[in-house]
Image: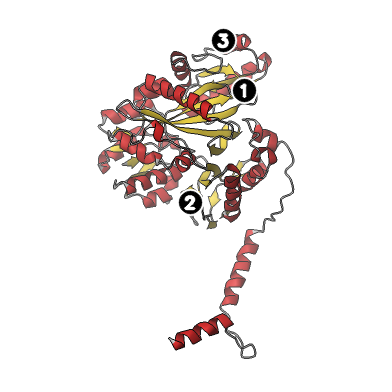
Amino acid sequence: MLIANRGEIALRVMRACREMGLATVAVYSDADRAALHVLYADEAYRLGPAPATQSYLRGDLILDIARRSGADAIHPGYGFLSENADFADACTKAGVTFIGPPASAMRALGSKTLARQAADKAKMPRVPGSVTGLKDVDEAQRVAAEIGYPVMLKAAAGGGGKGMRAVTGPEDMPSAFMGASSEAERSFGSGEVYLEKLIERPRHIEIQLMADMHGNCIYLGERECSVQRRHQKVIEEAPSAVVSEDLRRRMGEAAVRLALSAGYVNAGTIEFLVDAEQNFYFLEMNTRLQVEHPVTEMVTGLDLVEMQLRIAMGEPLGVRQEDIHLRGHAIECRIYAEDPDNNFFPSPGLITRLTQPGGPGIREDSAVYPGWVVPLDYDPMLSKLIAYAPTRLAAIDRMLRALDEYVIGGIKTNISLFRRILTDEDFRAARIDTGYLERLLSTAPAADNKTEVPEDIVALAAALFSASTQLTPSESEPTQPSRWAQAGRQEALRA
């Protein structure tokens, strides 16, 4: 198995492969020569220079390494080539199994505009707007006038908040259209954008799907992804605090209907917007494994990566829809190398110290270690911290405890942001929507009772403590064993 990715997702896939007895092949750029996924794999091959366009986005180089290493399957992870239908086709032509949907399904559902057309055919409710890419600003103005402002421009070929612009009036459309199209071109190689109605204060709810090659497709419950910054998810939960059994069933069945109509296979996610009256609207489909898949694994007890691999091997799904039961609550925090006190400016550099959290209900998907240099060339996510507990509030409190244990020295991280969110009354009461975090950040943070101690002071204190424990007691201060120690020695002598 060749893993055509980097960081924590590469390591996550490799762990599933190792449990299944599959040898792993890593690929790396010059910036990732000492990365943990490279050290963990059975074999590792250099791709090229640091820029993704010269390394992780070079499908031809990846397929050449697959041929040289003898890999007969490629897992793309998420991002990079994971939703590239041309790469999936190239894998098939090279006789290499692509761990994901067939290219035809990827083209039908991976493109945001084609997916909206497929949603119409499947009679799925969707957000009003265009179903094809916009030709120019004039067409954007016409469609916006028909459905009414505010509207949202979106990249047809991508996600993750790239190529998105909210437009509140016609006077803002020309600059917004140019900005969205240019960013989409830089991010995805296509400047095509479409337009949809901007729903006020919606919740972002997504349904996880699994489909095999034998016509079976099931949904694994929902994830709440409403806590976002600039359309990028920050915290994810499973299940949602506001989704009823009836709404879950209706959303799940609609998602399965769309997937089956497109001949979908493997893991996928249908994203919805849900309004205050619990009406749901199709948003888009992600034809790959999601960053936030661990929270679904925690509440279902299933290994989604192992399921992906077994589906690709031709095995039928090992579970039926009636076997899926959601138990407890899971929350995921995306830990980034960025400074929330400085407009979330990236913070690459050397990790000098690392203390990772643990204990009951805590999972960390990570690929960092002390002495590793966080590169500036890629997304700054360091790890994903997941907390699981019987209830939502218990999971929140467990996450707060884990965040208190998490120390990453040498760089800035967004850990303090999560403490602020998880102690906020609105979040704890599940009064959230896609604009929640922006509103929270616009207010002054409450005084934090945690005092950040400078790293050099911490290091000095640790050195002094270590030295003190090695000092030999002076003759004027004889040591006296405790009564517990004396009793233990006497018992040992009697034995």
Residue holding disc 1 = 277
Residue 405 placement: quadrant = bottom right
Please, what is the three-letter code of the amino acid marked with disc 1? Answer: Glu
In the rendered view, tell whether residue 424 sits above or below residue 267: below
Question: Could you tell me which residue is drawn at 29 percent across and 37 percent down?
Answer: 73
Badge number at residue 242: none
Give coordinates of residue 257: x percent, y percent. 42, 21
Residue 181 seen in the figure: no
First-in-chain label (3 vs 2):
3
Nearest to the eye among marks 1 and 2: give it: 1
* Marks 3 and 2, how far apart at CA: 47 Å
Question: Could you tell me which residue is drawn at 54 percent across and 21 percent down?
Answer: 281
SS for callout 2: loop
Give coordinates of residue 44: x percent, y percent. 34, 47
Residue 143 placement: quadrant = top right
Give coordinates of residue 197: x percent, y percent. 60, 17
Question: Could you tell me which residue is drawn at 55 percent across and 47 percent down?
Answer: 348
Residue holding disc 3 = 139
First-in-chain label (3 vs 1):
3
- Depth check, front residue: 33 or 284: 284
Residue holding disc 2 = 368
Please, what is the three-letter code of the amino acid marked with disc 3? Answer: Glu
| Quadrant for the C terminus in the image | bottom left
Residue 477 seen in the figure: yes
Question: Could you tell me which residue is drawn at 60 percent across and 34 percent down?
Answer: 228
SS for callout 3: helix
